[in-house]
Amino acid sequence: MSENRKYNRSKIVKVSIKLLLGLAGLLCFISCNQIYTPETFNISKEIQITKLNKNSYIHTSYLNTESFGKVPCNGMIIIDANEALIFDTPTNDSVSSILINWVQKDLKSEVVGVVATHFHADCLGGLDEFHKRDIPSYASHKTIHLAQTKNRITPQNGFDTHRELKVGNKKIINTFYGEGHTADNIISYFPDEKILFGGCLIKSKGAKKGNLEDANTNEWSHTVSKIKEDHPEVNIVIPGHGAYGGKELLEYTIALFQINN
């Protein structure tokens, strides 16, 4: 065999090995960093689920209102190690029952808590079902006080401005940044996935100002500006109503409620 043929053969073998190693690395990367495409499905005619990834879901139920008609209302579910935390209840007890049963059966997770982001019915309307099942509930002291004054079901465990909760091996940070939609509205942040559940404090892209009955429109923009500054890394933002998005929802909400608007 000539020297040239030996050289070419050796070169082909080296290139083939590099290609195989590269392919092996790519397969390892894909298996270790699975990409989940969000999917949406109904678990009953009253409630819809959007799967964001293997740990994070949006639940959407519906509230019949005099001023705005039938309104879709979002909440969040975070799961890990066969435990689940739910953020904002569905709009009534029967739909809460459907959601809890689905989490237990389909996600094979025990609901270890529910967080109410403010005192309105689209956050607390199904709370009694959670209490009947001995699932602890959490909210700010302001939310508890306002729920009591409105004779609504009251969350059990209160905090002032900050409360971290564990679900499995992961944490969710619940924080009051200031007034906006209501005097008590908090946000819940899941740092592992950089997901922020803003509740009704955050508007979906293109949404109008909505229910301002208990709002502080002078502070709303300032409050969301503080959230944006505190979470520059956020990937997904879930509003209380409408489609989820990214940090552009924070920017949209800030602009919507600026004083000169």
Image (cartoon, rainbow, N blue to C red):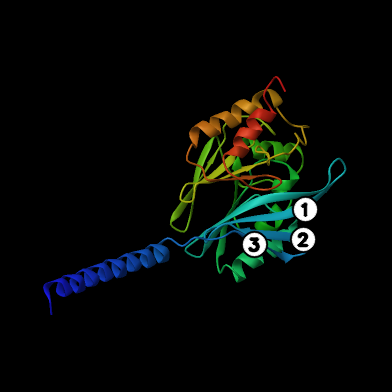
Instruction: Give 112 or 60, whichever is nearer the viewer.
Output: 60
Residue at 64 percent of width and 37 percent of height:
185
Q: Is residue 109 left or right of residue 4?
A: right
Query: What amino acid is at disc 2?
Result: Glu
Instruction: Give 28 or 142, whichever is nearer the viewer.
Output: 28
Q: Please say if the residues under marks 2 and 1 sit with CB atoms less than 8 Å apart.
A: yes
Looking at the image, residue 184 lies above or below residue 30: above
Q: Nearer the viewer, mark 3 or mark 1?
A: 1
Q: Residue furthest right?
A: 66
Residue marked by disc 2: 46
Residue 46 can be seen, yes or no: yes
Looking at the image, residue 14 lies above or below residue 149: below
Mark found first going from the N terminus, 3 or 1: 1
Residue 80 on image: x %, y %: 49, 60
In whole angstroms, how far apart are the C-alphas of marks 2 and 1? Answer: 7 Å
Q: Please say if the residues under marks 3 and 1 sit with CB atoms less than 8 Å apart.
A: no
Badge 1, how many Cα within 10 Å: few under 14, some, many 20+? many
Q: Is residue 15 left or right of residue 37?
A: left
Residue 202 on image: x %, y %: 65, 38
Query: What amino acid is at disc 3?
Result: Arg
Image quarter of residue 18: bottom left
Residue marked by disc 3: 133
In whole angstroms, how far apart are the C-alphas of marks 3 and 2? Answer: 21 Å
In whole angstroms, how far apart are the C-alphas of marks 3 and 1? Answer: 22 Å
Q: Is residue 133 left or right of residue 189?
A: right
Residue marked by disc 1: 62
Looking at the image, residue 58 lies above or below residue 26: above
